[in-house]
Amino acid sequence: MTDSKIFLDTAPFIYLLDNDENFGDKTNRILSAFVRQNNKLVSSVITCTEYLVVPYRANNRPSINIFWELIKDCSIDLYPITQPIAEKAAEIRAAYKFKTMDSLQLAVACMGDCDLFLTNDKQLRQFQEIPCITVAEWEG
């Protein structure tokens, strides 16, 4: 997958930055390949909120800084939640019964014209508007 726009859900950030024993190395290989292949990486402010809770609870300033360094170093665009995105999320939630945060993430990916949604939530693979793939099943 080259020159594509890829949405990164929160799980890949957690796996990579927290050195997850099951998916940390694999996530690093996936994101490295995305960058090498000149893909555009995007996420949303929801990802910031979801990832940063644990470091803030632990007063772990190094983890907070590493998160922001990753965003900057990989040129990951962070999309805000706007009214059109909120409305799209409501449509997604109504159709698929996904959780609110998942629906918002998917709505950002849709409204941002993403080609792929990288997650590790198997339930999201049923979404029809954008291919959703889990870190676990990634073969690239």
Image (cartoon, grey):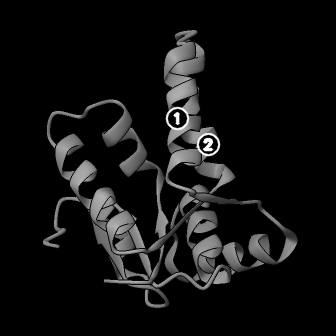
Q: Residue furthest right?
A: 83
Image position of 139 (left or right of 43): left
Closest to the camera, between mark 1 and mark 2, is 1
Q: Nearer the viewer, residue 66 or 37?
A: 37
Circle 2 crowding by C-alpha within 10 Å: few under 14, some 14–19, many from 20: some
**Mark number displayed over residue 48:** 2
Q: Residue at x 26, y 49 (%)?
A: 28
**Residue 89 spot, x, y in % from top left:** 67, 73
Q: Decide: is 21 above or below 100.
A: above
**Residue 125 spot, x, y in % from top left:** 33, 76
Q: Nearer the viewer, residue 128 or 19?
A: 19
Circle 1 crowding by C-alpha within 10 Å: few under 14, some 14–19, many from 20: many
**Residue 80 spot, x, y in % from top left:** 76, 60
Is residue 93 visible in the rendered image? The answer is no
Q: Nearer the viewer, residue 65 or 129?
A: 65
Question: In the rendered structure, are the residues bearing label 1 and label 2 in contact, judged by CB atoms less than 8 Å apart?
Answer: yes
**Residue 65 spot, x, y in % from top left:** 57, 25
Residue hosting label 1: 67
Marked residue nearer the N-terminal end (1 or 2): 2
Image position of 16 (left or right of 117): left
Q: Residue at x 57, y 57 (%)?
A: 76
